[in-house]
Image (cartoon, coloured by chain):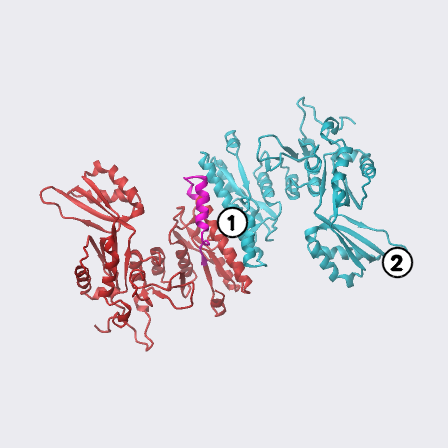
Chain colours: A red, B cyan
Amino acid sequence: MVDAQEAGNEVVVVVSAMGDTTDELLDLAAQVTDSAPAREMDMLLSAGERISMALLAMAINKLGASAQSFTGSQAGMITDGIHGKARIIDVDPHRIRTALDKGNIAIVAGFQGMSRATNEITTLGRGGSDTTAVALAAALEADVCEIYTDVDGVYTADPRVVPSAQKIDTISSEEMLELAASGAKILHLRCVEYARRFGVPLHVRSSFSQHEGTWVIPSAEDKITTQEGVALEQPIISGVAHDRSEAKVTVVGVPDIPGKAAAIFQVIADAHSNIDMIVQNVSTHGTGRTDISFTLPIVEGADALAALHSAQDQIGFESIEYNEQIGKLSLIGAGMRSHPGVSATFFKALSDAGININMISTSEIRISVVTHADLLDEAVRVIHKAFDLDADNEATVYGGTGR
Amino acid sequence: MVDAQEAGNEVVVVVSAMGDTTDELLDLAAQVTDSAPAREMDMLLSAGERISMALLAMAINKLGASAQSFTGSQAGMITDGIHGKARIIDVDPHRIRTALDKGNIAIVAGFQGMSRATNEITTLGRGGSDTTAVALAAALEADVCEIYTDVDGVYTADPRVVPSAQKIDTISSEEMLELAASGAKILHLRCVEYARRFGVPLHVRSSFSQHEGTWVIPSAEDKITTQEGVALEQPIISGVAHDRSEAKVTVVGVPDIPGKAAAIFQVIADAHSNIDMIVQNVSTHGTGRTDISFTLPIVEGADALAALHSAQDQIGFESIEYNEQIGKLSLIGAGMRSHPGVSATFFKALSDAGININMISTSEIRISVVTHADLLDEAVRVIHKAFDLDADNEATVYGGTGR
């Protein structure tokens, strides 16, 4: 940070709570009550960043540079009033601007803000610290938002599953969005969405080295050029993501009449569950009934099942099947728009490996399938190899110009 | 608190940080730097009350009552901008008022506020939590500000030194001010000053029992009456305080010309030391020089000595003597105004016990002397007994009406 400032940059640092602080605060709350008011939980948890940011500001001052720390509300992070998972609705960083103008490094508490209507302290929920950084970068019109993490960038697949996975030097925010939505853990979906909407370039890099990481570029037109100055066409495929955090629910014997599917998804929505993939089977001939399958986060499974069971008479389905032993694999690449052979290669590779497919969903730049959980790692390796993403074949990852 | 609310009261609770929290935060800061910016130290330390107040609000909600916690700035504690020892300059408790109107118990972080000019988070320094409570009580026009402590009230002397010391049922804020200024630890001077200025009745009581403690009443006219409705005249003497936290400095051989004493005290003031008692000896015949002695807090001794030494040439004194082996004893009572025999009794008692006196200072309602530290406890017991404060003689403590 001090280096970056000395290199002539204005520097804003967004911090999380230190190490186990958040868990310790949650433990304290659990000792007091099992039903803490969300307002008070936000008050409690927001102390964590306050401690880390003050200590960091002290450390920077000790190094001879000048730093000031700011709470979320001081930094102008204005949110709605939903405690525990507030959304940012405005950013007014005038105090940060002033601190920067005076030559300070600004240290900002991530994950927290203040509600516009009630001036209450809020926390942003999952992905909140990275999103704070992106939101501030957008409001301050920063050149780049650097996201420091424990790995050195975004990979074509999880290196723990695919040892030959390669670090991606640059990726469009559209593709990064699909990767994040498909289970890549390195960046939270929310942070990528925000960066894409406001055109903030992200640099995902390691806390432990000075190496370049992965640049996430807001629009495909901004993609980096080669050393010779020739713009490379984007690669057909950017990477393979996988996700074990979902379960599959099948509602069996749904009356095959209009409105039944809608009724089911309304019940799920009312239970605050987020459905991912959906498959409606064709009506079983003669019975007038059909099956509807969908996936949702395992952590939301119990609530969703309870809600469905209580609506069984109203909807008129026969039974529910629930399966957590599934895995989702997603192939992402903006180039697949113009390369019609991608899905053929994709399904042939899985078929050749004897991997059965449960569900399929696609977008313009993504193909996702659900397999049995035990087959997921093998599926990831097979797909990674089929699209020449393995490290030894690096040169062939990019499509040639003019094709 | 919940009991007090159920009894029909509106309740505001001012909290400190829990147990060792403040020490732990100070340790963290010390690991980072030995010269933390005061602004960042305030940011860090203010996290302590935030944790305790959120947990307390959760606990009260768990008990079925309704509570909301408020930071110093949310509670409207407006201060000056002196980090670490900010003064309260205004209190705007409209959010507390609203919370009370809605039937909530309001939990407020003590010890902290927000600076008016810069909107920075400040801490109030020593006595800050009690002072927060008194300031809020004044702004909310509360009936009483209850100060919870680990003893059950204010005593006529420290019971560890004088086992026969008695709990005082009621005392004027003027006398309490002198007691606090003279070393009684139970209430901080600042809190008593604030209560006196704004007419807030204090009730000093134990956290561990429901017994009545000591009432500190803003003006003598408000003193409690007996069960028969007869107003008691105030006692001649309210108590004996002692203090081991001061050191005595003697500046030897000061040129006996106008302005030299002022120069010495300016040097001390510039070093931010607080002088308590002062004695200027008569000029030693023929030398044209005199000695000036004063007391100040031991913790400020080193800085004050350094400042004096660096001004030695300018002031022209010969040497400095420094002695931490002193103790201060103070006898306090509003009744001594109209009882001229008090000082005679006081000095005779010390003389009879063979206790030598170093320095003397008096106010209208106080006599203070400095003795050798080893003799202090004995001096406290002798004086306590001489003024019939010992428990067996309780009835004679009060002066009769009409005397």
Check the residue under mark 2 and report the chain it is in: B
Please give the residue where the numbered disc 2 appears in the rendered image. Answer: B287
- As drawn, the label of residue B117 is none
Alpha carbon of mark 2 to alpha carbon of mark 1: how far? 59 Å
Dot 2 surroundings within 10 Å: few (below 14), some, or many (20 or more)? few
Where is residue B399, by image quadrant?
A: top right
Where is residue A272, by image quadrant?
A: top left
Residue B84, compared with residue B159, is above or below; it is below
Magenta part of the chain = A14-39
Camera-side residue: A375 or A334?
A375
Q: Residue furthest top?
A: B228
Q: Amino acid at mark 1?
A: Ala
Q: Residue furthest left?
A: A286
- Quadrant (top left, top right, bottom left, bottom right) of the C terminus of chain A: bottom left
Q: Is residue A119 visible?
A: no
Camera-side residue: B192 or B184?
B184
Where is residue A177, by image quadrant?
A: bottom left
User: x and y percent of residue A150 in the render?
Assistant: 39, 60
On the same chain, marks 2 and 1? The answer is yes
Residue A20, compared with residue A9, is above or below; it is above
Does the stretch in magenta take in A33? yes
User: x and y percent of residue A108 in the render?
Assistant: 47, 57
User: x and y percent of residue B373 in the render?
Assistant: 75, 45
Does the stretch in magenta take in A135? no
Residue at point 60%, 53% (across, down): B82
Element at label 1:
helix
Please give the residue where the numbered disc 1 appears in the rendered image. Answer: B47
